Amino acid sequence: MEKGSIARVPVVAILGHVDHGKTTILDFIRSAHVQEREVGGITQKISAFTIDIAGKPITFIDTPGHEAFDLMRLRGGSVADIVLLIVAADDGLQPQTLESIEIIKSSSAQPIVVINKIDLPDVDIEKIKRDLSSRGIQVEGMGGKIPVALVSGKTGKGIPELLEMIVLVSDVEGLQFREEMREGVIGKAIALETVKDKSKGIITTVILQQGELNPGDWIGFKIGTDIVVEKVKGIITEEGSAIPQLTAGTGGRILGLSAPVNPGDAIYVIKDKSPKVLEEILKIEVPETAEGIDAQDISNLFAQSESTVKSLNVIIKTSSEGSLEAIKKSLLKVLEDEAKIEIVDSGIGDITLSDVEKASVTRSIILGFEVSVDSNASRIAREKRVLVRTYDIIYKLVDELKDALSLLGTPQETEEEIGNAEVRAIFTLSDGSQVIGCRVKEGLVKKGCKVYIVRGDDIQGEGRIQSLRDKKETITQAKKEQECGVILDSKVDVAVGDSLYCYKIIK
């Protein structure tokens, strides 16, 4: 039991390098096979689960291992009583292992080293212990007191002993001290993640540090300079089951908030709707969060006066605040000295028509992570030539962004639509050339210009007009209502009823 507080459930955060087995170990503990549902086999969201170990509830926080998610790991470590540092026996200490070590060293949480994949051949456990000790993690057997568990997340070997160790450490070492709650406050939670679900709206994953939280309770938090007070509509598990109550140390997902809570910010449970009790707290209390990176920060970092600096405008849409934060942080690491990125806008939720309109006006590309594109937005994006890319794995997004930056050194070209036509017939000449019989509906169709063949909302192919004829006469352009035959420089999938859009290239 903590000083000045009622007893609460111990919180255990799991840290370590990508693919070292963090989620696999947690899967074995709770037998839920979470990893099978993760895109690309890696954890890309922070999540919390409370389970029972030998009659004692323990809350686990699973954190992403990819380098882009280090702020998520920092939040996970900051709210934990115990931190499990997972190290793969065949891989040793890697970049995110070292990063996790720094989180542990700056935290008052009790560490346990978990060496995973011990079932693999030719592993050197003692070398890993020596490497840890050289980094300031003084483990047992190397002159230190930090316990070490040897496990195999694949076979389950050593997992029962690890669970016993967690319970023992929480009993012997006790839990981190949490300050006493102020009058009028009956609970305090820390937001770990916020996502926007298509059916449920905004969902916030929290760990309740003190007090209790029930559906129907009033909660307050800060968005910018505003204090928001709302009633909790519901609390669910990661799997979507209803939770009747959160007690101190347990985790869950709050439903029905009108605004996304910034990851790392505090959420207060209050006795009544009046925000007065929060005004003093939120004026003087700094949220327990890492230094955030917002769009303005990045824009300021790369604002330069030289007109020769190349620029890439970006709009980012993601499924969660945590992944949005991770992607913004990744941008800082991939930029080359001669390139500049400006984040024009960002947010959570699907890519909409307003995103495309803003991208068109600001000449931006749109990057989406774990989101979809509204069908109307997709159609307008094609019409306005707005580049939209969506991803399910963060490193693929980062890699493609690197490629985009490398292309900034080439002369910039833009496409301007000059006309469109309806495909009315398809002919094949004796030499195998395909002739597309068209009637111009708007503007011009010109020889040498680039064209797109569009069916419904989908682009079927593209090419340049190699030859343009009016009956047997060779022409350089066809005007509105004029019929013509088009031969492209490439073979495309075209059918009667398709549309042909003609563009000129402007450098």
Image: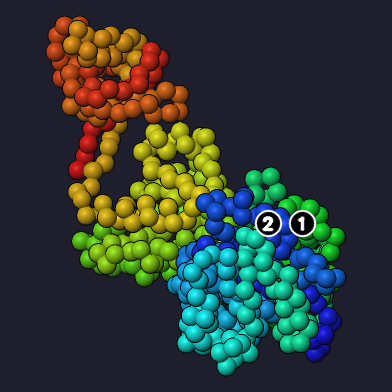
For the N terminus, the image quarter is: bottom right
Q: CA distance from mark 1 to mark 2?
A: 9 Å
Check disc 2 and report the residue beneath it: 203
Which three-letter amino acid code belongs to the residue tagged 2? Ile
Query: Extreme front residue here?
Result: 121
User: Could you say which disc has been placed on residue 236 in the image?
Assistant: 1
Can residue 180 be seen here? no
Neighbor class of circle 1 (other Cα within 10 Å; few <14, some 14-19, many 20+) is many
Could you say whether the residue bearing mark 2 is in a helix, strand or loop?
Answer: strand
Image quadrant assignment for residue 329: bottom left
* Lower position in the chain sequence, tag 1 or tag 2: 2
Q: Residue at x 59, y 88 (%)?
A: 141
Image quadrant assignment for residue 268: bottom right
Residue 207: image location, x then y, percent: 71, 69
**Nearer mark to the viewer, of 1 and 2:** 1
- Disc 1 and disc 2 in contact, CB within 8 angstroms: yes
Residue 440 lies, with reference to residue 366, above or below; the image says above
Q: Residue at x 34, y 24 (%)?
A: 453
Image quadrant assignment for residue 154: bottom right
Q: Is residue 440 left or right of residue 224?
A: left
Neighbor class of circle 2 (other Cα within 10 Å; few <14, some 14-19, many 20+) is many
Can residue 415 be seen here? yes
Could you say whether the residue bearing mark 1 is in a helix, strand or loop?
Answer: strand
Q: Is residue 191 left or right of residue 498?
A: right
User: Could you say which disc has been placed on residue 65 in the image?
Assistant: none
Residue 468: image location, x then y, percent: 19, 17
Residue 119 lies, with reference to residue 465, above or below; the image says below
Residue 163 lies, with reference to residue 260, above or below; the image says below
